Every structure is written in structure tokens, then in C-alpha cells.
Image: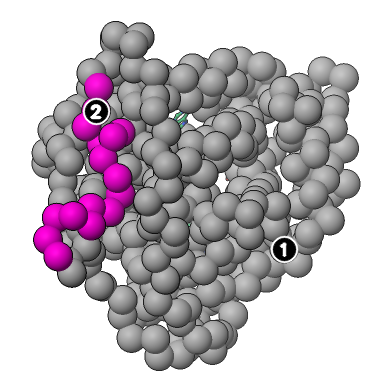
Amino acid sequence: MALQAASLLPATISIHKEAKSSAALKETSLFGVPFSTHPRTELGSPLAIGQELRKKDVSAGIIRAQTAATTPAVDQAASPGKKTLRKGNVIITGASSGLGLATAKFLTETGRWHVIMACRNFLKAEKAAKSVGIAKENYTIMHLDLASLDSVRQFVDNFRRSGMPLDVLVCNAAVYLPTAKEPTYTAEGFELSVGTNHLGHFLLARLLLDDLKQSDYPSKRLIIVGSITGNTNTLAGNVPPKANLGDLRGLVGGLNGLESSPMIDGGDFDGAKAYKDSKVCNMLTMQELHRRYHEETGITFASLYPGCIATTGLFREHIPLFRLLFPPFQKYITKGYVSEEEAGNRLGQVVSDPSLTKSGVYWSWNKNSDSFENQLSKEASDAEKARKLWEISEKLVGLA
Ligand code: LMG
Ligand code: NDP
Ligand code: PMR
């Protein structure tokens, strides 16, 4: 059984006001990131609370009933005048290494979050959680292989059977295949980078929207990790090969490399470009979710560039010389480097900080590690392209 049923204590803890100053922030980064004087978002006002909790069928018997499922988000009876909040439940895909793991560590250490680590390798995830010292009661590992749509659907079923409410979803997992000469494919035959990073997450997010809607947590969020390298309004985004979705003809054809190109724009296979294209899809999807669902559901949709975490497993397929030189290059030359810990702290803020509730935003951080609303490239903010991407993706994952 690839499930560890963690017992979720009905943790009652005080709502923690951790909002930082709302002073306007100025971007100071030298490379690629536009100057910004956007004011900080306002303190998030708690959304409607006390909505009716869903009752999950936990009769399948493979997972113990979780107390959190029947615990309202805010316990107003606890002590007069003092509202308490149960632990939030956050699903993080790809939490077995890098940014996902660092975020899981950050959030569980606050004592206010239970992390569902959605990972393709159960043993690796278990070892990873242990190695960074996440307490047993603060995480649950559930199997998810984003390179298989059946696995995505199975994951959603398993999660629902657990009876846990879903408060935040973080689409973080990704593969990067810069040295691949030939394309490889997901179970359904989509080119692996876009298939995993975009299409797998697209189906996951669409299915779990219902679960998010039913949560009574004060601030519900759906976060998709983006990147600077998908944004051609930056220097980093101009390092060849550049992201470009073209007219999406390859995606329309199913990215299968047979009767259609494996690349979204219909061109020849290039693994680095496929990754950057997938990040553009991630950022467009976040905005389309915002346009379609924010007003109706109150869910905060967000994306971010966490900084250049040059030491993660993302670069495992790159040549050894690159892996050796890339971290010092980013540390000392571009100064875009951030540690896994710092990046986990940043994504953790987007999950939980009361000041980051604005929806439709692509967050970045300046040199002082202050967050600001960043500008996306022309293509990554093209609403018409986002709509087309949405409609084609729906067909490919079997939702339309
Ligand atoms: C493509 O090549 C591949 O074709 C593709 O398969 C895929 O791998 C893709 O994005 C991934 O890359 C990209 C190619 C294009 O880049 C390179 O080949 C460069 C490799 C460099 C790797 C980065 C490590 C750099 C190591 C430098 C050594 C640093 C040592 C640090 C020690 C510090 C100690 C104090 O690249 C280009 O074509 C370059 C064109 C880039 C366009 C932007 C131009 C900006 C110019 C500004 C220069 C800034 C400084 C440069 C760095 C100098 C390095 C010394
Ligand atoms: P890592 O390789 O360390 O983490 C990626 C995670 O995704 C791993 O846990 C991996 O699982 C998981 N994963 C890969 N394929 C699948 C799959 N088919 N199903 C389920 N999980 C899968 O890289 P990072 O931590 O660097 O990357 C995390 C996110 O950050 C990505 O979205 C990336 O695009 C983004 N990002 C990273 C930057 C960086 O500089 N590193 C910069 C900007 C954005 P496993 O452990 O089993 O391999
Ligand atoms: Mg890049 C100027 C700043 C800057 C930043 C913030 C990044 C981030 N990179 C910058 C500059 C440059 N890079 C320059 C000038 C070069 C040419 C020498 C360069 C090269 C380069 C390569 C070959 N950079 C890379 C690669 C990769 O293989 C990485 C990649 O593109 O993966 C898709 C990468 C990255 N640079 C970044 C970041 C964050 C990456 C990691 C990829 C990501 O997740 O987006």
C-alpha cells in the first residue's frame, strides 16, 4: 500500500498574524527582472468560514479516518474571543527533493501545516522527509506519477478517500531534459517535459478544484511554480533556446512525435525549449484559472519564480561540467542564486503568508528577499493564448 495514513490531530492553534509591512517594494535585481514599484498586497481578509464540511466516504478501509475531515477550519468555541485554526492541508507535487521538499520542511516547521507529499517514488519521498527531519505526524506520502493521467486520477481518488480536506495545492514537480537528443513520452504519449510539467498538473488542478472549493479554510490557494527562463522579458529568458508556444499546432496534434511534432510550436525536438515552454504553460494556466474561477470560488491562484536554485535535482540530466559550474556562475556572476532553504521559505510564503492572498499574481523576490508582483513576458501573459492552451489541454487530458 503506497499510502501512509498519518493521524491528523485536530490541532487548534492561534491564527498567526505574520503580515509584513505593506510598504511599496522596489526591485533591485540587476539581471532580467523588471523594476517594480508595486505596493504590497493588502492583508488577506479571512474568507467565509464555517461552510458546510464535506463528508467523505472513508469506508474503503485502506485509510484511517482523519480527524481533520470533521474538524471545522476555525474553532470558535475554543476560547471566547480567540479564534483558533486547524492545521492546513497542502498537497505538494514533487516534494521528494529540491524546492518541494524544502517547502514541506518550512511549512511543517511552522506547526500549522500538514503536507501531503505527492511523489512518484514512495521510498525516496520517505527517506527525504526523514532526512530533513519532518515529524511523522506532519506529512502523508501519496503516490503520484504526473507522467500518467491514470496515476493522476488514481491519486485524486486516493486523496479523497483519505477524508482530508484540501486547503492548498502546490504544482511543483518538473522534469528538465536538456541533453536529450530524442523525445521521450508519458504513458499517454505526450512529450515528457510538457506532458509531466503542464498536462499532468493541468488535470490534477482541474480535478482538485472541486476539493479546494469544498474546503472551509480561510485562505484557499492553488499555486503553480513558474520560472524566469520561460519569460523572454528577462535576460535569463533570452538564453537560447527561447520559450515559444507559436500557434500551438504541435499541442493540437498531441505532442506525440508521430503525425505531430513533440514540441508545442510544431518545431524539432529540443529538451531545454520543451521545459521552458512547459513553464510558460504553467504561468498561462495559473492566469486562466484566475480568470475562470477566482471570483466564483475565492481561491487564490498564484505562480512564482523562486530564484535560481542551482543545486537541485532539476539539473540531474545536464552534463557534469554544467552541474559543476552552474552554481558558482549563478552565485558570483548573475547573483540569481538562492539556497533550497531560502526558496522553500519563498514558496512557503505563497502558501501561507496572509499578505500574499492576491490572485492572478506571479511572485518574485528582490535582493532583500522581499516579495513583489512581477511582470510576465508578452507570451506568458497572453490571455488569448491562455484560453486556447486551456481548451486544447482539456481535450488532451480527457476533460472535454
Ligand atoms: C543550450 O545551450 C543547449 O543548446 C541546450 O541543449 C540546452 O542545454 C540549453 O538552456 C539549456 O542550453 C545554451 C548555451 C547558449 O549556453 C551555453 O552553452 C553556455 C553554457 C554555460 C553554462 C553556464 C555556466 C557558466 C559557467 C561560467 C563559468 C563560471 C565560473 C564561475 C566561477 C565563479 C567564481 C568566482 O548560450 C548562449 O548562447 C549564450 C548566449 C546568452 C545570451 C545572453 C547574452 C548575455 C551575455 C552576458 C554575459 C554575461 C556573463 C556570462 C558568463 C560568463 C561566463 C564566464
Ligand atoms: P527537483 O528535480 O529537485 O524536484 C523536482 C521534483 O519533481 C522531484 O521531486 C521529482 O521526483 C518530481 N517529479 C519529476 N517527475 C515527476 C513525475 N512524473 N511525477 C511526480 N513527480 C515528479 O527540481 P526543483 O526542486 O529545482 O524543481 C521544482 C520546481 O521548481 C519545478 O517546477 C521547476 O521548474 C521550478 N524551478 C526551479 C528552479 C531552479 O533553479 N531549480 C528555478 C525556477 C523554477 P523524484 O524525486 O522522484 O525525481
Ligand atoms: Mg541561466 C542573468 C541572470 C540569469 C538568471 C537569473 C538565470 C537563471 N540565468 C541567468 C543568466 C544566464 N544563464 C546567462 C547569461 C547564461 C549564458 C551563459 C545562462 C545560461 C544558462 C543555461 C545553459 N542558464 C540556465 C541554463 C540551464 O540549463 C538552465 C535552464 O535554462 O533550465 C531550463 C538555466 C537557468 N538559468 C536561470 C535559471 C533559474 C535556470 C534554471 C532553469 C529554470 O528552472 O528555469
**Who is closer to the viewer here, 159 or 189?**
159
Indicate left or right for 189 with 374 as reference. right
Report which residue position mark 1 lands on: 381
Q: CA distance from mark 2 to mark 1?
A: 40 Å
Is 1 above or below relative to 246? above
Disc 2 Cβ-to-ligand 2 distance below 8 Å:
no
- SS at circle 1: helix
Indicate left or right for 109 with 335 as reference. left
Residue 78 part of the magenta segment: yes
**Residue at the location (88% across, 46% down)?**
247
**Who is closer to the viewer here, 90 or 380?**
90
Q: Ligand 2 lies in which image quarter? A: top left
Q: Quadrant of the N terminus?
A: top left
**Residue at the location (39% across, 86% down)?**
22
Indicate left or right for 348 with 108 as reference. right
Determine which of the numbered discs, if any, sits on residue 352 in the image.
none
Report which residue position mark 2 lands on: 66
Q: Quadrant of the C terminus?
A: top right
Region rendered in magenta: 65-80
- Residue 170 at x, y = what percent? 44, 45
**Residue at the location (63% across, 54% down)?**
296
- Residue 249 at x, y = what percent? 87, 37
- SS at circle 2: loop
Query: Which is more N-terminal, label 1 or label 2?
Result: 2
Q: Quadrant of residue 98?
A: top left
**Who is closer to the viewer here, 152 or 100?**
152
Is 204 above or below relative to 330? above
Task: Tell us which disc is closer to us: 2 or 1.
Answer: 2
- Residue 34 at x, y = what percent? 59, 80
Disc 1 Cβ-to-ligand 3 distance below 8 Å:
no
Which amino acid, by three-letter code, is at mark 2?
A: Gln
**Residue at the location (54% across, 57% down)?**
298
